[in-house]
Amino acid sequence: MKPTVLAFDVFGTVVDWHGSIAAEVTQLLPQADPIAFASAWRSGYKPAMARVRSGELGWTRIDDLHRMILDQVLTELKIDHLTEAQKKHLNLAWHRLKPWPDTVRGLTLLKQDFTIVTLSNGNLGLLANMAKNGGLPWDLILSAEVFRHYKPDPQTYLGVCQTFDLKPHEVMLVAAHKDDLEAAHACGLQTAFIERPNEFGPKVTRTDLGQESWTTYHAKDFIDLAAQLKAAS
Amino acid sequence: MKPTVLAFDVFGTVVDWHGSIAAEVTQLLPQADPIAFASAWRSGYKPAMARVRSGELGWTRIDDLHRMILDQVLTELKIDHLTEAQKKHLNLAWHRLKPWPDTVRGLTLLKQDFTIVTLSNGNLGLLANMAKNGGLPWDLILSAEVFRHYKPDPQTYLGVCQTFDLKPHEVMLVAAHKDDLEAAHACGLQTAFIERPNEFGPKVTRTDLGQESWTTYHAKDFIDLAAQLKAAS
């Protein structure tokens, strides 16, 4: 049975965080290695969320977690000449992440037959600004901020189902990350894996793009997913 | 100073709840008075929310409050032949409310210069389905459900500001109801009153459409509001 709602992971699945952050770092900090900078900033993300998930930190939005990590990265790289306004602007680079080339066309196709929503750990303001900047045609922006739980907590996946009064198998998570899809699968959702071979930048070759037996769909990109869903009976 | 974000009340301001509900009642229940039915259903709305706001009821979504009131109205009108599926479908009429004639064009104009969001007591699923049915081009759907407070609690108006990291005067509430605007004004938001003379159906003449000294804008409809905002320096 086809799902009713498609819920999309965002960072890496919908937008190219690595390329977008590296481009902004190149502009603002020509002396830094933009690829290493982007990777360092992102690698602080899961540990920071883990502190919220464990209860060590109270509820903290990604904007604020991004800023805490940015300050650490700048200290480690001994970059101390940025003004507060420059740091604030750089931190909002996550609101300006660029869609992958297939994203807008693919989402527009999928929106014809499904309700398309985000399910991201990014906060609502970040996701709304990103959608406005990038022309992302969401039917609804859902965020960890709504459920006060970060993925992969089950409250997030089941929260999408409850929002639309649907059973888990009527919702499909679309993501480029198998741990996210595994957690959704454990909650009974359908799953679509999207290959994003360049998610981690030009220097990293992803070795985890193989097809899994437990995913419902496996697609190169959103246009491929739309075609596979059209063809499914 | 012009606002950055426009937050819209929805029922009555963006969509014609009275006409839409009356039309569905006419179809399903030809023996009932559609105008009286729509008014009775809606008039249970504020008392039901008041029970949640006072803490007498735990958090309850509008979909569920609508259903509680519907069951009361059906009992009062001695209508007992509807199946559970028919009642469920009728209750979802609130997901299918039709936009006013100026709504989609007006929102599209306003979206060019502002971030446009909902601030409605309707739940997220209801608002998302309504937007998909009616082609409402929101940048973000915000709901009492996100803040776990119903309007006119200040947490809702200030919640919009916090979502976008804005000061209260950088956000403007757009609504056809002065009590809603008064509560937003008390929180420091800008306000725009929209005349919706037919909100309560053809039999009710609204006597509360006059211009107030404390509102920031007063407009006939969304197209008029867009023109006034364009003209403002």
Image: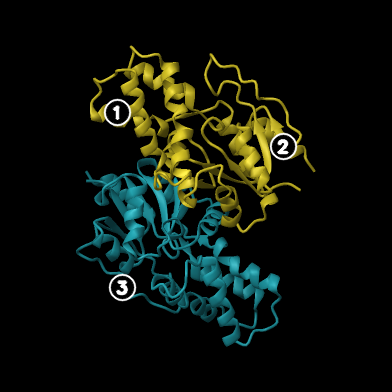
Chain colours: A yellow, B cyan
**Is residue B226 in sight in this rendering?**
no
**Is residue A101 in sight in this rendering?**
yes
Distance of mark 2 from mark 1, alpha carbons? 40 Å
Camera-side mark, 2 or 3? 2
Image coordinates for residue B226, horizontal then vertical, percent: 34, 49
Check the image and report above or below for A3 versus B99: above
- N-terminal of the pair, mark 2 or mark 1, is 1
Check the image and report above or below for A159 versus A92: below
Q: Dot 3: within a 10 Å radius of its alpha carbon, few (fewer than 14), some, or many (20 or more) residues?
A: few
Q: Which residue is mark 1?
A: A87
Q: Amino acid at mark 3?
A: Asp
Q: What is the chain identity of the residue bearing mark 1?
A: A
Camera-nearest residue between A192 and A69: A69
Which residue does the image show at 73% across and 35% down from the upper left? A228
Distance of mark 3 from mark 1, alpha carbons? 48 Å
Q: Which residue is mark 3?
A: B208
Q: What is the chain identity of the residue bearing mark 2?
A: A
Q: Secondary structure at mark 2?
A: loop
Which residue does the image show at 65% across and 39% down from the upper left? A182
Q: Dot 2: within a 10 Å radius of its alpha carbon, few (fewer than 14), some, or many (20 or more) residues?
A: some
Q: Are marks 2 and 3 on the same chain?
A: no
Q: Which residue is mark 2?
A: A215
